[in-house]
Image (cartoon, rainbow, N blue to C red):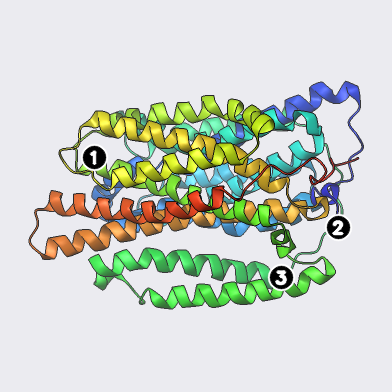
Amino acid sequence: MSAETMLGAQPAAAPADNTARNRLVIALLLVSTFVVFLNETIMSVAIPHLMTDLNVTASAAQWLTTAFLLTMAVVIPITGFLLQRLNTRPIFMLAMSIFSVGTLICAVSPGLELLVFGRVIQATGTAIMMPLLMTTVMTLVPPASRGKTMGNISIVISVAPALGPTIGGFILDFLDWRWIYILVLPIALGALVLGIVKIKNVSTPRYAPLDIISVILSAFAFGGIVYGLSSIGEGVAHPEMVLVPAWIPLAIGLVSMGIFIWRQLNLQKDDKALLDFRTFASKNYAFAVMTMAVAMMALFGTVILLPIYTQNVLGLSTLNTGLILLPGGLLMGLLAPTVGRLYDKIGATKLLVPGTIIVSAVLWMLTLVDQNTPVWAVVVGHITISLGLALVFTPLFTASLSSVPSKLYSHGSAILGSIQQVAGAAGVALFIAMMTIRTASLSAEGAAPIDALSGGIRMGFLCGAIISLLAVAGAFFVRKPDDADAPPHAGH
């Protein structure tokens, strides 16, 4: 299966007079994807509010982020099928329509259950947008210009989730949490209308198989693992609220993952796999994906834990919390194009090694925070970890996808996207679980509530710091593929 086939298209090489059209399509996709990706983390600063307003625990409230990421991980592999069966314009309309419906459900939700359901609907639309953007770019953009475009995509991947808490903080300081969705809804509808009017079809639909059993297995695999991780913390703090022990969904998830992998290994012999694991024959791809997973765990775990720390331990408002996270998010955006150009000049390793070391160092420093930590130290720490992540995301994204043969590009992209989201969900679940377990332990020992929570947050960051050492090790093995190794441009 060629790179073009993955797109669900056999596009002809774009003629010169289509340059303006192609730029407009990519620009609209970038802006729309940025809008939907904000919702991955926009609720993180609202977690303390929701815990009070809806009378739920941190472990329950974090499902607003976890369910979003998990849904994306389950849906992303299916988008390969959708992109082959539908053209550019209708698939965009489908994605933004689904996202808008989910936003509306969230805006009118009376409680946590319907709110989480709305987030799942939102995530379904978001999951379609990212592969649509990537596949369109790989079709329309010639190899010589991809570095710059990859930098723009990195802004969407890393900066939109980083800015989510800031925007959420501004809204929550003045309005009810539902206004996060009330204000996003017209923006989403505006993007939908603009896309309907302006986006042109740049591909041709074709038949593509879809293995339903693989889809079901992937849902049980990813869902069981992440739900099991989330249940660990909930079971320690509130055992009466846990319906089943954490090991049961974990076991179901791991067994389902084993069967899912086995099925893919058999289906890929006939090029019918939902995810083709022959991509991991490239050691460079394998190391890049592993390092990306750890980086996503660090990003989302930090994004979910820092607001709880600043609001419940330091006593800051949601607005101040958003302002604390703003400089780091902006820095990642400003650096992404520069890092893309540096990647073209000096390769991946010289960016990844210092980047992963910086991320790890900050996570180790965050294991020392308490109620006496000055706010400026938190700001500096977040700016520094954002710098490290900026050095990590663009090289990993570009090096990984450039390391697989063009016939496996669709699967390489789908696997990378799925692992990104599962790792983010696992990071959120793991950080919260460790925080909850340690907080409950210290409370049982008689510690004051703020001391117990502070100790729990330190434990969450300690877990992330230990895991980050894997990224540092993996960074030494990721390189920029030689031109001769890179898959050919679609249509060439």
Locate residue 156, reporting x and y percent.
57, 35
The type of residue carrying mark 2 is Tyr
* Residue 160 horizontal side relative to residue 303, left or right: right
Earlier sequence position, callout 2 versus callout 1: 2
Tag 3 residue: 264
Locate residue 475, reporting x and y percent.
55, 48
Q: Relative to the observer, which residue lies in front, 214 or 345?
A: 345
Q: Give the Cα separation between the discs numbered 2 and 1.
A: 52 Å
The type of residue carrying mark 3 is Gln
Q: Relative to the observer, which residue lies in front, 360 or 192?
A: 360
Tag 2 residue: 207
Tag 1 residue: 311
Using the rendered image of the protein, determine whether residue 41 is visible from the camera's viewpoint.
no
Locate residue 348, reporting x and y percent.
62, 40
Classify mark 1: helix, strand or loop: helix
Classify mark 2: helix, strand or loop: loop
Residue appearing at x 92%, y 37% in the figure: 12
Earlier sequence position, callout 3 versus callout 1: 3
Query: Which mark is nearer the camera, 3 or 2?
Result: 3
